[in-house]
Image: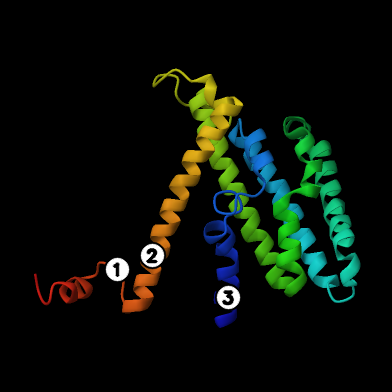
Amino acid sequence: MEEKKGLLSIFTNGIIKENPTFRLLLGMCPSLAVTTMAKNGLGMGAAATFVLVGSNLVISLIRKIVPDKVRIPVFITVIAGFTTIVQLLLAGFLPELNKQLGIYIPLIVVNCIIFARAEMFAQKNGPVAAVIDGLGMGAGFTLAITLIGSVREILGAGTWMGIPVTAKLFDPAVLFILPPGGFLVMGFLIAAFNKLADRKKSETETQEETGCAAGCPGCSKAMHGGEA
């Protein structure tokens, strides 16, 4: 049971507490460049998740036999191998998406998120935990850039996943699918995500200190010296 809770904590860590885009501000180039449409964000997130999980697994398996002096070239080689695989798969089965994502697929090799997890987590933990970490970080990255792409596409083009959704509501503002709009949307989403995450953290800490959920009747009575 404790092991399952530990693995769940590792997974959710990448989605909320250490979300690579909204909390750690890693991988900003693809987060801004490919998020003019929601499907581009989803595709980029899925590709990065594939590389994250694969490279984390392999690096965790070989971590004890790789000399410390050459670990960085080895990590890059492993990451490059999985990036090549995902690039060939996209080119073969999803050529249109591959064209939309362009240079940012091969640039996964030098994505800060991928290398950071290899260096900080995969080389220090077992394969199961490394895979869960890759899934969590990948899910957090995918969620973030898909959300950014959704907001930009809806406001800037009036569509979502290519489907018209605002035709009778308002006229799209092209600004949002241009670079300035990307920075604007990302800034607001980062602020909103951090506000919610910090509130959740504060509630969790309060619950741990008091032994009950914040705002429960017992706490209210205690704070006011008895019943209201």
Which amino acid is tagged 3? Gly
Q: Secondary structure at mark 2?
A: helix
Applied colour scheme: rainbow
| Circle number at residue 214 | 1
Instruction: Give the alpha-carbon distance from disc 2 to disc 1, as whole Å.
Output: 9 Å
Which amino acid is tagged 1? Ala
> Can you give x and y, in whole percent of width and height, for residue 184 in the image?
51, 33
Q: State whether residue 200 is above or below residue 92.
A: below
Q: Verify CB contact (< 8 Å) between mark 2 and mark 3.
A: no
Instruction: Give the alpha-carbon distance from disc 2 to disc 3, as whole Å.
Output: 21 Å
Task: Write down the residue under mark 2.
Answer: 202
Which residue is outermost to the left? 228
Task: Write down the residue under mark 3.
Answer: 6
Q: Nearer the viewer, mark 2 or mark 1?
A: 2
Q: Earlier in the sequence, mark 2 or mark 3?
A: 3
Which residue is outermost to the bottom? 2
Nearer the observer, 85 or 193: 193
Say few, some or many: other residues with alpha carbon within 10 Å of mark 1 (under 14 / 14 to 19 / 20 or more). some
Q: Nearer the viewer, mark 2 or mark 3?
A: 2
Which amino acid is tagged 2? Ser
Nearer the observer, 116 or 38: 116
